[in-house]
Image (cartoon, helix red, strand yellow):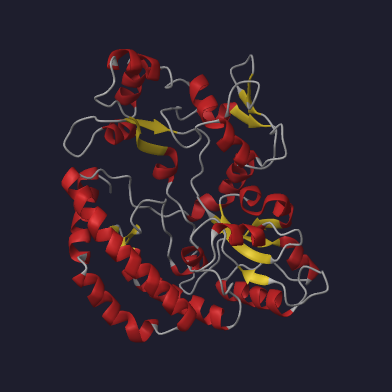
Amino acid sequence: MPNLKKILDSDPVMKNLATSADGHIYGLPAKRPCRPVVGNQVFINKKWLDNLGLSMPTTFDEYLNVLKAFKEKDANGNGDPNDEIPYGKGYADPFYFFALPFGTNIGADGTYAMAIKDNAPVFLPVTDSYKQGIEAMHKAYEAGLIDPEIFTEDDSMRDSKLMSKTPVIGSAAGWTTDSTFGANADQYVPLPALKGPDGKQYVASDPQHYNYSRYEFLVTNKCKDPDALLKWIDGFYTEDASIQNYYGGFDKAVKKNSDGTYEVLKPDDDSSADTFAWVNSLRDFGPKYVGEDFNSKVKYESENGDASKLAVDKDFVQYAKPAFPNVSYTQEQLQNLATLYTDISNYVDSSQADWVTKGGVDKGWDAYNKQLQSMGLDKFLEIQKDAYTKSGAK
């Protein structure tokens, strides 16, 4: 596999991701093109702000005041002052993103709610940031600023609110405005990185997970000719293959120019740029690789989707903090995590919903931590810290 070998020899991150905790290579990694540093973020309805003569909030307290105005007034201008939902469920965790100004800067999905604070790995649901975020969200919930169905609604209920013909959601989190709000996207803009109680500004950032991934291709023992298969797969590790793998085929989704640059084309239907890419390519999945200078070769015909994400990224990247790295676990560790984290996560989620909707986090915090200890939190953290140390992260 000459293409992949050249990549592994030149990119230590790819080499690290290809190598399992026992030193062997069992699956092939990938590096995606045109990925941001900042991930999901909170959006706010700019038209509602304008309708009510409000300025864009820059602090958490100002944000709460805006949400209160959304609740009390006819922000969407349809004559009904009671149909607005100030903060609703989007396509990212509604708690962590509401509480982001308190330092709940979670990384990518699948990182076990681990984060880096003071240069050390921590489990976010037992941090002071998490507790403070719970307290703040409960107060907002009691004040009617949070969708009362935020912890119970299914995807269809969520989508009907986000994409209602007359917008009813004032603020919610997601990847881009078009992928979160559909036809209503032009009313929404990114919420600034709000200053929290400590005066700091936080964003959800995990560039290693957004850009790189493990195990994007594996060969099973049922394969009759592994050499031929891997020779074919090696062809995926080129620039031409990678951009088509991520957006869609040439002339359908991407145009390759004579000067070696690429143009991502507008969707040829009424779908969003993000949806169009997911339908017409492997998108985040499958083997692919682009070098450090590749993104400068890519232009966008459409202004939404990745084009808007990368444009916004320039304004928010300054607030990015270190994230828990893309670590490798041994088979024994993975088996232990599968058992430990299922129980821990379920308990954390149920406690979170109870505390946000009913209150009581301060009174129940010690018992909550003791229960997590009894569920094996120390063992869980031991595994995470071991994997973190062996990853060589600093």
**Residue visible at 64% across and 71% down in the picture:** 86
208 relative position to 43: left or right: left
Residue closer to the observer: 37 or 230: 230
Residue 296 image position (x, y, % from top left): 56, 30
Picture quadrant of residue 376: bottom left
**Residue visible at 49% across and 57% down in the picture:** 203
Residue 87 image position (x, y, % from top left): 60, 69
**Residue visible at 37% across and 84% down in the picture:** 362
Q: How many marks?
A: 0
**Residue visible at 78% across and 72% down in the picture:** 52
Residue 218 image position (x, y, % from top left): 31, 29
Observer able to see residue 64? yes
Is 389 above or below relative to 96? above
The N terminus: image quadrant: top left
Residue 151 image position (x, y, % from top left): 50, 69
Observer able to see residue 42? no
364 relative position to 174: left or right: left
181 relative position to 338: left or right: right
Picture quadrant of residue 170: bottom right
Is 306 above or below relative to 152? above
Is 266 above or below relative to 115? above
Which residue is outermost to the bottom?
363
61 relative position to 113: left or right: right
Is 108 above or below relative to 128? above
